[in-house]
Image (spheres, grey):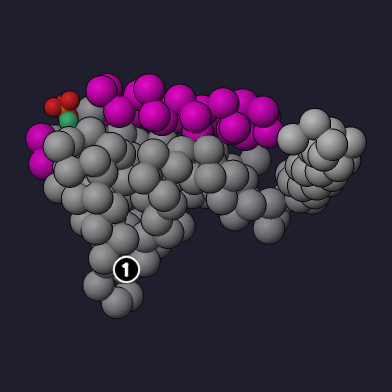
Amino acid sequence: MKKVAIIMGSDSDLPVVKGAVGVLKEYGVPFEIRVMSAHRTPEAATAFAKGARENGFGAVIAAAGKAAHLAGAMAANTTLPVIGIPVKSSTLDGLDALLSTVQMPSGLPVATVAIDGAANAAILAVQILSVGDASLAEKLAEKRKAMQADVVARDNALQEKLDTL
Ligand code: RP5
């Protein structure tokens, strides 16, 4: 199975990024997690992205806050799908990182999830890998069914206690 790369601009992003780690573990998807910065270690970030495909990765998740150029820098140096997580790590509450990550020029897409949306970033990475992996596709479908059953159960519980509201 292809691996997922999780790159974060700083180890201070880890509390958010853990949400992606948990999902990848749940699906049994192999991953590597690294601290690399578009600004502080640009050469290392570039080299990682350039070698990502031949090193067995199928998708790259890049998490960064503030003037967040990490996902874009990854996308500039690989044709693998890149998923950006804007991290809320500044006085601007992550809006700065969201705009920096999502506003990519035409031709270099970054699939940007919500501010601190690490779980969705990992689910999207699993969905990308599932295109070539039937067992992952099956696990995703099972998870959807479980999610639907959970909502139905909550609705049923709500209907039962309407009189007490
Ligand atoms: C960004 O700056 C990082 O991704 C992090 O969200 C933020 C702060 O980094 P530290 O100063 O905590 O290392 O590049």
Residue 152 or residue 75, whichever sits in front: 152
Q: Is mark 1 within 8 Å of ligand 1?
A: no
Q: Using the rendered image of the protein, determine whether residue 99 is visible from the camera's viewpoint.
A: yes
Going by the image, does 102 lie left or right of 144? left
Residue 107 or residue 148, whichever sits in front: 148
Give, as a single range, the part of the protein colored magenta.
11-40
Q: Position of residue 124 (x, y in %)?
A: 56, 50
Which corner quadrant of the image does residue 25 belong to?
top right
Residue 57 or residue 141, whichever sits in front: 141
Above or below, 159 relative to 128: above
Dot 1, crowdedness within 10 Å: few (<14), some or many (≥20)? some
Amino acid beneath label 1: Leu
Q: Using the rendered image of the protein, determine whether residue 46 is visible from the camera's viewpoint.
A: no
Residue in view at x 35 percent, y 24 percent:
14
Q: Position of residue 81 (x, y in %)?
A: 45, 57
Location of the C terminus by quadrant is top right
Above or below, 142 relative to 157: below
Residue in view at x 15 percent, y 37 percent:
91
Q: Position of residue 13 (x, y in %)?
A: 30, 28
Farthest-out residue, left:
40
Residue annotated with mark 1: 108
